[in-house]
Image: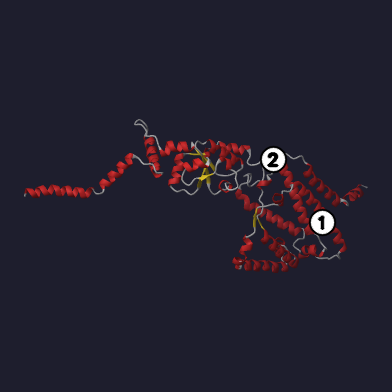
Amino acid sequence: MGPLIPNGLIPMEWDSIIAIIIGIAFGFVLEASGFSSSRKLAGVFYGYDFAVLKVFFTAAAVSVIGIYYMDYLGYLDINQLYVHPTYLWAAIIGGIIMGIGFVAGGFCPGTSLCAVAIGKLDAWVYVGGIMIGVFVFSELYSFFEPIYNGYFLGNITLVDSFGWNPYWVIFIFSIIAIVAFVVSDVVRKKVKKVFYS
Amino acid sequence: MDKKKIARVTSFRYQILALIFILLAGGLVLLPKYQKQEGIKSEALLSHATSPERYISTDQIANKIINKDPSFILIDVREEESFKNYSLPNAINIPLAKLFDEESLPYLNQSQFDVVFFSNDHFYADQAWMLCNRRGFKNLRVLNGGLNTWFTTIINPEKPSQDMPAEAFELYATRKASSMYFGVFYPDQQAVAEESISNTPAPKKVITVQKKKKKPVEGGC
């Protein structure tokens, strides 16, 4: 049956409208749960607030379990889902840069836009920084291109490239998630509390 | 009393949620596995098989080749020996046994070009079509009748008899013209060519004839 759009259950023309609705809902949930505060995000690195870790880990684990149950019951074909292509070194270097930006600025690109929407000044500065980064990258594109387009590995997944059993991977991933939540709670209780709005 | 009970349960809410979470993940591991059908659904395969787009006629393909249509690739699924002996122009040889080889997949598993299978008849080509369709490849066609029909229609078209409709003569003319494109030589083609050769210097001859006519007149004078 699913995925709904590639199989024509929802016409392709609704793509943008659905994307806008999901985007608004995502932004609203981010803001409502306090993710537009840079302190909340930076809290993961300083150990006083692990909400970001818990939310994104839970989201990934719940959705992967749901997808595999739906695949098992025949409501969704996993092979039809879009797998983002891997550019190995571009992903590693980009990840490091984004991590530094994350801990230094206290935003990820999505939450920074949420914070811009509610008028936080640091978010304005942060988004300005993103724009400068985009500009610098575009200007030096010919210099970065070999890394940007190189080390292309195709639309691979861990399960395919290592030949793992996906069900065991999900089970182990869930256990890791639970362990990470418990450990993060222990850490949070030991670290001095920080109060912020 | 009830509130106390609820409070006691909810104080364990994270543990309960974690337990449900682990149970669900473990359930995936423990579920009995079954062989899933790979490739497209049988209903989709049936609709492809009954689609009028499945077959392409020799006339259509001849027209495409002559007009240098870049939108399709011809795949010859016969053995390499027969391929070397005769094949359609620009055809690619992928014997049926090597259909799913590493180097043949880029030709078949793509969405830019129409893939037209052909063999001597359309028997092997149909099998290749079916196998590729099962794998979910797109834009697959079969040359109706294969090379045998190619020979009887395009290379050596049957001359229509006098009592046949005008369309048959038109079709014959088109087929004959396309067979000329593919290198067939007709005796009457030579005659036409000779006529055209004799026609072009004709004005000169006419002039000479006129001169000849004049000469006796001159001689008469």
Residue found 86% across the figure and 64% down from its top:
A191
Looking at the picture, how far across and down is residue B206, in whole percent?
Answer: 19, 48
Residue wearing tag 1: A180
Q: Nearer the viewer, mark 2 or mark 1?
A: 2
Give the left or right position of residue A146, taking residue B86 as reference: right
Q: Looking at the image, can residue B86 be seen? A: no
Quick one: B119 or A93, which is closer to the camera?
Answer: B119
Visible in this render: residue B42? Answer: yes
Tell me the amino acid under the disc marked 1. Ala
- The subunit letter for the residue under badge 2 reads B
Residue drawn at point x = 83 percent, y = 50 percent:
B18
Q: Residues within 10 Å of mark 2 (few under 14, many from 20)?
A: few
Residue type at mark 2?
Lys
Image: B142 above or below A188: above
Return the chain for callout 1: A
Q: Residues within 10 Å of mark 1 (few under 14, many from 20)?
A: some
Secondary element at image label 2: loop
Residue A4's x, y, as percent?
65, 46
- Camera-side residue: B149 or A56? B149
Would residue B125 be found to the left or right of residue B156 on screen? Answer: right
Regarding mark 1 in the picture, which secondary structure is present there? helix
Q: Identify the mark at residue A39; answer none if there is no mark.
A: none
Q: Which mark is residue B36?
A: 2
Quarter holding the C terminus of chain A? bottom right
